[in-house]
Amino acid sequence: MAEKSERLLNLYIMLLAQTRFVSKQDIRRAHYGEYADNPRGHEAFEKAFERDKDDLRELGVVIEVGSLDNYFDDELGYRISPDTSSLPEIRFGADEAAVLGIAARAWEQATLARATTEAMRKLAAQGVEIDTSRLDLVPPSLRAEEPAFDACWEATQKRRVITFDYRRPGEEAASRRLQPWGVVRSSGRWYVVGFDLDRQAERVFRLSRVQGKVTLTGKSAAYDVPAGTDVQAVAHNLVHRTPDIEATVLVRQRTGVALRRQSSSIEEDVAGPDDASGWDRVTVSGQARDLVGSVLALGPNAVLETPADLRSDVVSRLRGVAS
């Protein structure tokens, strides 16, 4: 498969780079070396060349056929016109560019920082203007500090099997073999989701519990992710979750959009801290860790009222920052 892909790519590049039609004989010498000087290999070459042309056409490549000589049309040649292969110019509006900038900023402190930085540099080189002042509305929030993240991410892109030692709470570390389908974030933690080869079932593993090095084994494209798989849904179903907690939060008006979207009710225009006006009381449910993080992220624009233990956690963290 790898040899065929390389041959198709080389054939595509050769035909695309030509300003004139290329004869079959030249193509045969350049890319079908096993048939080049073997007279008996002519039929095999013809079949291989026809298959490769069909494969390129299925990919949307337009192969032009024309005469090698302006005066005689007894021998045909081949080429690919840049006009039929070039992608149309891509333009981004101000809002679209801002979204791209926010996505890059979100990964600023994570392993994908190199890729997002390079993407933004290419956009800038193409003259895409990004209003950096709008990016400050969304602080960086995606971190991938687990040592296992890079290897798991790479394996999902290449579809290679990984092996690693995994330790559950109260248990000894055990070796696992996984066909990773994706890496997802849930409840503030990173997980790798895939098919466990030893247990022959879907499994999810928290990256912070991976012990030592993650090793990629075998060839690329060694397996296929089942059609229609929703990796986020699989992780949600398999990860053990504690029951959601209901909390009430005072949120300053025109702030806290994320909390408001997941709220079950909103009491508008209530008295806030020190009986100040301009606040709404939002009732929201979620994991304790997520609720505390959402309130802290809003700074002076949110005050967690109940439950008392969650409020104490917020106060304790704020005092820690202050000290």
Image: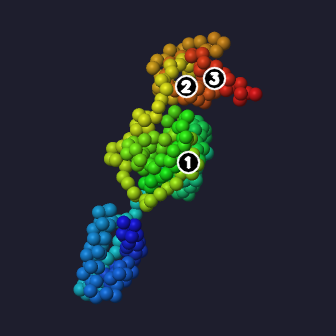
Binning the other alpha carbons within 10 Å of mark 1 as few (below 14), some (14 to 19) or many (20 upward) gives many
Q: Which amino acid type is marked by label 3?
A: Asp
Binning the other alpha carbons within 10 Å of mark 2 as few (below 14), some (14 to 19) or many (20 upward) gives some
Q: In the figure, residue 220 lies in which quadrant? A: bottom left
Q: Which amino acid type is marked by label 1?
A: Ala
User: Which residue position is annotated with label 2?
Assistant: 288
> In front of the other: label 1 or label 3?
1
User: Which residue position is annotated with label 3?
Assistant: 313
User: Which residue position is annotated with label 1?
Assistant: 148
Pick whichever of labels 2 and 3 is earlier in the sequence.
2
Any part of residue 235 in sight: yes
- Relative height, residue 220 to residue 141 (above, below): below
Mark 3 lies on a secondary structure that is helix
Which one is in front, 2 or 269?
2
Q: Which amino acid type is marked by label 2?
A: Ala
Question: Quadrant where the C terminus lies?
Answer: top right
- Relative height, residue 227 to residue 282 (above, below): below
Residue 68 percent across, percent down from the top left: 31, 83
> How far is the residue under mark 1 from the one under mark 3?
30 Å
Mark 2 lies on a secondary structure that is helix
Question: Residue at position x 58%, y 36% from top?
Answer: 137
Question: Quadrant where the N terminus lies?
Answer: bottom left
Give the colour scheme of this rendering: rainbow
